Amino acid sequence: MGSINAVVDLAIEDGIAVLTVDNPPVNALSADVRAGLDDGIRRAGQDPKVEAVVIWCAGRTFIAGADITEFGKPPRDPSLPALLDTIEACPKPVVAAIHGTALGGGLETALASNWRIAAPTAKMGLPEVKLGLLPGAGGTQRLPRLVGVQPALEMITSGTPVGAKQALAMGLVDEIAEGDLKEAALAFARRAVSEGRPLRKIRDLKVDATPEVFAEFRKANARKFRGFEAPEACIQAVEAAVSLPVDEGLKRERELFMKLVSGDQSRAQRHVFFAEREVARIPDIAADTPTLPVAKAGVVGAGTMGGGIAMNFLNAGIPTTIVETQQAALDRGVATIRKNYESTAKKGRMTQEDVEKRMALLTPSLALEDLADCDLVIEAVFELMEVKKEVFGKLDRIVKPGAILATNTSYLDVNEIAASTSRPELVVGLHFFSPANVMKLLEVVRGKETSKPVVATAMKLGKTLGKVAVQVGVCHGFVGNRMLAARQREAQKLLVEGAMPWDVDRVLLDFGFPMGPFAMGDLAGLDLGWKKETSTSSTIREILNEMDRRGQKTGAGFYDYDENRKASPSPVVEKVILDFAAKQGVERRQISDQEILERCLYPMVNEGAKILEEGVALRSSDIDIVWIYGYGWPVYRGGLMFWADLVGPAVIAERMHDFQARFGDDFKVSPLLDRLAKDGGKFADLK
Ligand code: 3H9
């Protein structure tokens, strides 16, 4: 209990007022914190015994931002900008003492103070853009005045925090504390008093930049910002810092903030922030469930997937043995891993020493027996049940009792795989997404016998590997690929009915996906899972493979590619499609962009509804996470099911019924979607 209110304390130590915020877990600026700080600063300002103020936080961090849970609720006074005005107007020196993370409104609080002193491990940033927002309490006006326009633009539009050392170098903080932070801040405040330092107010600093700086910045980042509203608003606010007097700049910033905070993109991105934290919670597995140690890992298969999976373990510092059946394949796999690391090092994102450190953790082998003492073995071999069962049978006999056996299968029945071992409770699916060393999603497939500690271990392992782990149940394709299949099916059908691959791709690209399904197919290789011997020209894809148009690697697929792999619509493919449709007796028609979008996405929503009905996913926001981290779903649309709620289950169900009448049972509406449509419910509200 603080002396001002439950979350803010005011204590006077030797003439210095120490205002302590204690609002766990991250000292967010809730209404009580704002009121407490405002009151405390005013009292300190008026108290003749007080010569200076230190703002300081209890617990693990300085203020990590505005309280995100308050957005969208009726505002409560004092607002954050009003509080920061109070701080800035304090007639006595105010020093912010920063440890942990000073983020968003937290850093803005520090910027309204006269000086900032940081612990060596502190991090400072304005991550609002990641929530679809801009810093709305002076950050866009004060930061460029303090550090210059270019660094401010970078910090504000990327949201990436800087460490204490860099912050000192760029002038963001005034001192790094040696030893105890609070003591150092008190000493700093006393010095400011004894030296009679004039109060430094960032609002009074000059800021300057030519219009070209902003034009260049927009141009350089156009690709990265595509589709997002917040980065452009951030740039406009910084422009206002340069072109307007500070009070008008602050007003402009506020207007831009208010517009973003009430918009769909920010709602979507805030949803993702909480969904990403919620996904770790599994109702029937207590947070304190004991986990198994994973100190040594094994990977079976050194192909693209196996190699990528192994890299995750090496990155996390876990010694890993990788097994192949043939020396040549093993050498190729190991060489690819090295090549990937070397290329990261060449880009300056890793040192050569880091490369060698990781490679030294890797043991290549031709014998499964070498996996005997691993704590966890992941199999990434050919996607065929018989092959998987054989490997699991062997692993079960070889790998020490109590070790986890995991499969990277994308579609197959994990229960059946588990049944081929004597330890089904230790078998789990760990479904990585390609490229496995890059994509952040990890589907943790829980079999009917997988034990709770094994699921808990897999979820924790995901975090260790820098992934976002999502628990899913057993079914064909689990959550992600099962829903993707619905989209692929419709995309193929659209070609026969009247669209061209580039039409479908353009619509999905404009929607916000990094690329459309046909460009994606060309990139992955159209011959994935295709066999010449059994190919019967039964689909457009088969025909293209038969023509040796197997995607980017052969210079042709659904598109033609030039020597720089630049795609262009292919007249050959156009003819293939027209002939194929004619042969099927289909009279092609004009298909609108709207229909393309609905045909591709609504069946996915329907599949998502079935997945929820069956309990394959725990909650609709978990499905959102799968789509954002596994398939490049645009984060500003909040995930597939969040988007479905925005469009409205009733709208989607009605259109699906219409499609069913016209095109058949691929559009049969799930009972859950129908029920939500009838009751006016939303996926997000399902319990
Ligand atoms: C802003 O400041 C706008 C202003 O410019 C203008 C306003 C006018 N609010 O991540 P963790 C919760 S926008 C409410 O697991 P970590 C979080 O949900 C804000 N709650 O811990 C979780 O709850 P639970 C700008 C918050 O150690 C718990 O705290 N600031 C907030 O891995 C622990 O979080 C940001 O965007 C919040 N601001 O990471 C910073 N932050 O336990 C957002 C966290 O129930 N936060 N919670 O699941 C972060 O980046 C990380 O939480 C942080 C700690 C790095 C601080």
Image (cartoon, rainbow, N blue to C red):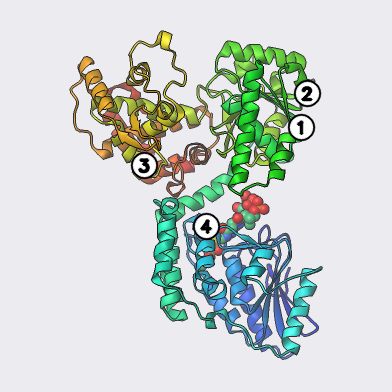
**C-alpha gap between disc 3 and disc 1:** 42 Å
Determine contact: label 1, label 4, CB under 8 Å.
Answer: no
**C-alpha gap between disc 2 and disc 3:** 46 Å
Circle 1: is it few (<14), some (14-19), or many (20+) Cα within 10 Å? Answer: some
Q: Amino acid at mark 4?
A: Ser
Q: Amino acid at mark 1?
A: Leu
Determine contact: label 1, label 2, CB under 8 Å.
Answer: yes
Q: Amino acid at mark 3?
A: Leu
Mark identifier at residue 158: 4
Looking at the image, is mark 1 or mark 4 nearer the viewer? Answer: 4
Looking at the image, is mark 2 or mark 3 nearer the viewer? Answer: 3
Residue drawn 43% across and 20% down? 527
Q: Earlier in the sequence, mark 1 or mark 2?
A: 1
- Which residue does the numbered mark 2 point to in the structure image? 402
Determine contact: label 4, label 2, CB under 8 Å.
Answer: no
- Which residue does the numbered mark 1 point to in the structure image? 292
**C-alpha gap between disc 4 and disc 3:** 22 Å
The answer to which of 289 and 496 lies nearer the viewer is: 496
Circle 2: is it few (<14), some (14-19), or many (20+) Cα within 10 Å? Answer: few
Q: Amino acid at mark 2?
A: Gly
Circle 4: is it few (<14), some (14-19), or many (20+) Cα within 10 Å? Answer: some
Q: Earlier in the sequence, mark 1 or mark 4?
A: 4
Looking at the image, is mark 3 or mark 1 nearer the viewer? Answer: 3
Judge whether residue 254 can be spotted in this image.
no
